């Protein structure tokens, strides 16, 4: 049934050096582990970094070779770990022949590039970053090729995009690197997202993301009605990654990367990920007209345009980048044909291109490194300075041009043979041979241009550096690759043959065709096409030679429509123009309209259930109106309305009125059986008032009469009217809502649970406190953490506080008082204010110990009677702030050690460690233990562990409240000092 | 009684919302304080109103018929404390904004 899956062979028959699982896991983990390690080295550790990276690459290469016999014998190695099995997502690794070929390329070329990079990177470059990203990229790329699950593949695919971004942007001080990196990430990232969706569609069709299952359901996928959307999405991913037309423009811009990166990512490996995927899914997706047209058009345009553009590049790396686009286009076109022979040629060309293009990039890097420029108009006659480099580069260029006896020739012959074959009667198919010959001729032209303009001709004149041969180990990787090109090109059957067959069979399975790898096939049409291309290309170069020396960069006509510029214009349009347009209509930067919308939305949200469920007044009889509470609220409501009326011009009055409303609330709590709330409300009221009083000093003066002169516009009037309506609506709404709820019968609530268990299980009679420190202790821990964070934020904000210039001086009242004191010879400045508050100050100072005792009392009784950590903490903080008010900042701080930040830390630590204490006894976090202790003289004392937790709450609340108040109180001292220092400076100057 | 408290909640909320929509930061902070009173009372009233029945147990266990509901009280207690903290934070933010922008308008600049 399942033809593609190799027969299962029992384990004992296998001769293995290593278990599949271990081998594949090590192969994927090793580069990432190496990456982490590499990041920890010193910035100038070039040698140790190179040893590490080289070691990792070598180990990966060794592992792939260890795996080879098993792959030949059994088809594929597999390892599977559960990840999210419910979602069909497992960490499946699968290495068949095709993945093996890629893994070998990735680790082998990776090893060579490490050698090269060791000499290429200068001592100023921070190499740990380079090698760390490099190894991580290697791991991601290995992940792409050996993933056995499509989602996992996409995951590694995205990782390659990210590390490619980081590597292109390695020299992030240059704008080119930043732009190139961003563009590459945007294009390949969007492609990656499309790919993810495409893969999800495929998973939906097949019912599994497992690669084996997907490869076995080709017919199902092709006949599905979701085939076309899935195909388009996957092609978006693959074509962006492989820089195929019309997404090709990011690749030339990625050339801002260090050359080892270009050699590795942008010729040999990452850009191959796209065509890897096309080949991987070829058995299931290819063979339909849609595939033929979409892939074929992209491939053919990339092939032709890439080659044409490459001729007109002056930058050596730019030429190679366009040539890469063209060669990848060739592979894409071969894959589009849907014929098995085409797939063979494509796979063969993937290998060949990787070898010759990586070596050419290395040559470009050497030339750049030794001469200081990559501009072909400046470079000339380098053969006499660096003959070895020149020879190697010439051989590699010849392979690129498809000269016989080199590997590029072989795959190009196969390509020509496929191009003249008729696969489907269409314009595209008819044009294929002509396009192929034309593109090959262009390839010959740019190859000759590269060799001729760089290595031959007169001596170069204005080179930044005097050129010479690079060190041997920098040349070695290139030498190795070029020798490989030669050997494969002359004796292909004996060298690359068996490996290619394993790779091809794993993709094509039983459809593997007969093919011949020999160099000589006799005089046939492909050979004639090669000859035409060689001659035409040479002639074209001779014709263009003069023009190329002087022309501006880029091909004629096409240089006007630059992909990059179109891309940038699109980006600007989407992220700037449209965003601004939408913002200008749908948004505002003004707070008031936003708040109005929020309030109205809340109002409507509250109205909706009433509208749906119907509005009915309650059935419960209302309790009798108590005249005293009614009076209290008459005052309270009056205070609230008056506060609203006065808050603009009479801030102090508004503050006092606010306190009035607060007191009414407080009395209500007492009245309605909530003593804990009343206590807390009262104390919080005190500290809030002090806090706002401290803040008043920094606000600008606002005088009714001055504003009145400006007058009220009709716009303001309208706004006020609207706001008034909104406020009244909200008021009536919430009043009606509360009344309705209060007159509904109370259904069964969780209150009974707490009332029954507060004493028997929590050991306390004050149910509210037991809920806070015991039943819902975790919530309270969260709340005090929030409190601590807020207090620290307040503190941090105030450390850099800059008051408005007109608020820096002492307040007006203080100035008048001081003037009075100065005028009188018997008085010192500050006497008036201290005389004025003399009696209250003495009382406040004497009250300090009393308030502390009160706080301790409130704290200790909290478990059984109204009180507790929160209330006690605020009372304690009030004791401190009273001292500040009575004696002044300096005096208090000379006498008391006030360390609120430490108290916050101590409180949090106490609460958390009390909670963790229960672990020691084998209970979950914050389980409390309660018992009573018999103390001499004092009597029975509750000693629940919740008390310790409450102590933490207490300490933290003291710390947080004191910190907020003091930080604000300090500002007047600080800014006065700062103001004085600045005036002294001015005087000094 | 329910009627009085409902009206009180309504007046507090209405005054608070009015101030919340005003252009001066100080007005907004007073408005938020008023709204927090109103909301605290509202949450508190979800346990229904009872006099002379604080949730402090007399015996070993209690019955909901004899005590006020402790759950809304516990909720409101922490809300009061957190409310203080947010008032402090907002106050500091408005002071910093006033220092940096030179105005106490909520937008950081006077309206044109």
Image: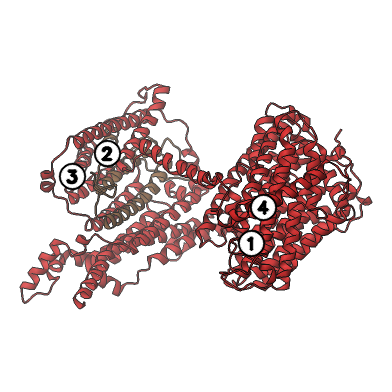
Chain colours: A red, B brown
> Dot 2 corresponds to which residue?
B12
Chain letter of mark 3 equals A
Q: Are marks 2 and 4 on the same chain?
A: no
Say which element carries label 2.
helix
Residue situated in front as seen by the camera: A803 or A550: A550
Quadrant of the snapshot with the C terminus of chain A:
bottom left
**Which numbered dot is residue A541?**
4
User: Residue A586 placed where, x, y %?
Assistant: 38, 36
Q: Name the secondary structure under disc 3.
A: helix
Q: Residues within 10 Å of mark 2 (few under 14, many from 20)?
A: many
Q: Where is residue A975 in the image (x, y as percent from the top left)?
A: 25, 66
Residue identifier under label 3:
A646
Q: Which of marks 2 and 4 is in front?
A: 4
CA separation in Å, label 4 and label 1: 27 Å
Picture quarter with the N terminus of chain A: top right
Determine which quarter of the picture holds residue A632. Answer: top left
| Residue A133 pos. (x, y %) | 63, 60
- For label 1, the residue is A259
């Amino acid at each position: 049934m399942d033809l593609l899956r190799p027969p299962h062979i029992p384990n004992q028959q296998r001769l293995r050096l290593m278990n599949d699982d271990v081998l594949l896991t090590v192969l994927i983990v090793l580069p990432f582990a190496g990456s982490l390690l590499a990041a920890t080295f010193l910035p100038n550790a070039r040698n140790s970094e190179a040893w590490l990276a080289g070691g990792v690459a070598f180990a990966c290469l060794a592992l792939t070779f260890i795996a080879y016999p098993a792959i030949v014998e059994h088809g594929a190695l597999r390892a599977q770990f559960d990840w999210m099995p419910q979602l069909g997502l497992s960490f499946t690794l699968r290495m068949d022949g095709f993945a093996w070929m890629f893994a070998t390329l990735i680790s082998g070329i990776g090893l060579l590039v490490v050698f090269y990079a060791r000499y290429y990177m200068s001592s100023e470059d921070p190499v740990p970053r380079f090698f760390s990203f490099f190894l991580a990229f290697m791991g991601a790329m290995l992940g792409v090729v050996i993933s056995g699950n499509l989602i996992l593949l996409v995951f590694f695919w995205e990782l390659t995009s990210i590390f490619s971004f980081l590597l292109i942007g390695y020299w992030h001080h240059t704008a080119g690197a930043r732009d190139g990196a961003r563009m590459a990430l945007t294009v390949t990232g969007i492609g990656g997202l499309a790919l993810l969706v495409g893969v999800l569609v495929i998973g939906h069709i097949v019912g599994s993301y497992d690669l084996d299952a997907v490869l076995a359901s080709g017919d199902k996928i092709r006949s599905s009605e979701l085939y076309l959307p899935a195909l388009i999405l996957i092609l978006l991913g693959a074509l962006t990654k492989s820089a195929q037309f019309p997404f090709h423009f990011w690749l030339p811009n990625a050339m801002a990367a260090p050359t080892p990166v270009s050699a590795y990512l942008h010729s040999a490996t990452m850009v191959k990920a796209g065509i890897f995927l096309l080949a991987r899914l070829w058995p299931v997706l290819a063979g339909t007209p849609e595939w033929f047209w979409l892939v074929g058009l992209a491939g053919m345009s990339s092939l032709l345009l890439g080659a044409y553009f490459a001729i007109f590049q002056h930058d050596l790396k730019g030429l190679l980048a366009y040539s890469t686009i063209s060669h990848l286009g060739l592979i894409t076109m071969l894959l589009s044909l849907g014929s098995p022979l085409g797939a063979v040629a494509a796979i063969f060309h993937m290998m060949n291109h990787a070898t010759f293009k990586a070596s050419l990039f290395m040559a470009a890097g050497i030339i750049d490194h030794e001469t200081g420029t990559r501009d072909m108009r400046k470079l000339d006659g380098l053969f006499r300075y660096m003959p070895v480099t020149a020879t190697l580069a010439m051989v590699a260029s010849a392979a690129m041009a498809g000269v016989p006896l080199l590997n590029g020739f072989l795959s190009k012959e196969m390509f020509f043979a496929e191009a003249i074959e008729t696969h489907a009667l269409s314009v595209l198919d008819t044009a294929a041979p002509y396009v192929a010959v034309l593109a090959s001729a262009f390839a010959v032209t740019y190859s000759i241009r590269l060799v001729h303009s760089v290595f031959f001709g007169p001596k170069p004149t204005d080179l930044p550096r005097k050129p010479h041969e690079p060190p041997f180990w920098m040349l070695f990787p290139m030498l190795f690759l070029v020798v490989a090109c030669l050997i494969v090109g002359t004796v292909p059957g004996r060298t690359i043959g068996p490996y290619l067959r394993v790779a091809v069979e794993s993709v094509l399975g039983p459809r593997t065709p007969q093919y011949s790898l020999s160099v000589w096939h006799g005089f046939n049409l492909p050979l004639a096409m090669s000859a035409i291309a060689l001659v035409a290309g040479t002639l074209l170069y001779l014709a263009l030679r003069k023009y190329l020396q002087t022309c501006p960069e880029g091909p004629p006509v096409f240089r006007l429509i630059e992909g990059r510029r179109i891309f940038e214009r699109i980006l600007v349009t989407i992220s700037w123009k449209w965003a601004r347009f939408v913002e200008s209509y749908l948004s505002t930067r003004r707070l008031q309209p936003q708040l109005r919308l929020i309030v109205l939305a809340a109002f409507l949200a509250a109205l909706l259930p009433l509208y749906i469920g119907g509005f009915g007044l309650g059935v419960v009889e209302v309790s009798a109106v108590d005249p005293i509470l009614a009076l209290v609220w008459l005052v309270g409501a009056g205070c609230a309305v008056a506060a609203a009326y006065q808050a603009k011009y009479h801030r102090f009055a508004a503050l006092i009125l606010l306190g009035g409303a607060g007191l009414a609330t407080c009395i209500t709590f007492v009245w309605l059986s909530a003593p804990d709330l009343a206590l807390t409300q009262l104390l919080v009221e005190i500290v809030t008032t002090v806090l706002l009083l401290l803040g008043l000093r920094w606000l600008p003066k606002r005088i009714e009469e001055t504003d009145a002169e400006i007058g009220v516009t009709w716009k303001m009037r309208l706004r006020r009217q609207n706001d008034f309506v909104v406020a009244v609506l909200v008021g009536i709404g919430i009043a009606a809502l509360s009344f309705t709820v209060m007159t509904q019968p109370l259904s069964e609530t969780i209150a009974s649970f707490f009332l029954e268990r507060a004493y028997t299980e929590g050991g306390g009679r004050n149910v509210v406190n037991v809920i806070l420190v015991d039943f819902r202790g975790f919530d309270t821990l969260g709340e005090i953490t929030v409190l601590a964070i807020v207090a620290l934020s307040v503190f941090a904000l105030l450390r850099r506080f800059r008051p408005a210039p007109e608020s820096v001086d002492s307040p007006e009242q203080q100035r008048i008082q001081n003037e009075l004191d100065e005028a009188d010879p018997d008085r010192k400045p500050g006497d008036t204010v201290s005389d004025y508050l003399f009696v209250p100050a003495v009382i406040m100072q004497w009250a300090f110990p009393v308030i502390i005792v009160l706080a301790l009392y409130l704290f200790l009784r909290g478990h059984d009677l109204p009180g507790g950590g929160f209330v006690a903490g605020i009372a304690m903080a009030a004791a401190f702030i009273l001292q500040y008010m009575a004696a002044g900042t300096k005096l208090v701080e000379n006498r008391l050690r006030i360390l609120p930040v430490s108290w916050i830390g101590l409180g949090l630590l106490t609460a958390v460690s009390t909670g963790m204490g229960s672990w020691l006894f084998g209970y979950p976090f914050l389980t409390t233990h309660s018992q009573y202790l018999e103390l001499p003289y004092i009597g029975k004392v509750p000693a629940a562990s919740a008390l310790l937790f409450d102590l933490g709450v207490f300490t933290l609340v003291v710390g947080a409240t004191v910190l907020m108040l003091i930080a604000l109180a300090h500002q007047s001292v600080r800014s006065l000092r700062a103001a004085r220092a600045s005036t002294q400076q001015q005087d000094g100057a | 009684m329910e009627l009085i408290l409902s009206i009180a909640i309504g007046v507090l909320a209405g005054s608070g919302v009015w101030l919340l929509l005003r252009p001066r930061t100080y007005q907004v902070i007073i408005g938020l304080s008023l709204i927090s009173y109103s909301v605290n009372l509202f949450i508190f009233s979800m346990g229904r109103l009872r006099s002379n029945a604080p949730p402090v147990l007399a015996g070993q266990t209690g019955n909901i018929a004899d005590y006020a509901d402790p759950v809304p009280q516990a909720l409101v207690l922490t809300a009061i404390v957190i409310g203080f903290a947010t008032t402090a934070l907002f106050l500091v933010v408005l002071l910093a904004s006033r220092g940096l922008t030179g105005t106490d308008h909520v937008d950081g600049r006077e309206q044109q």
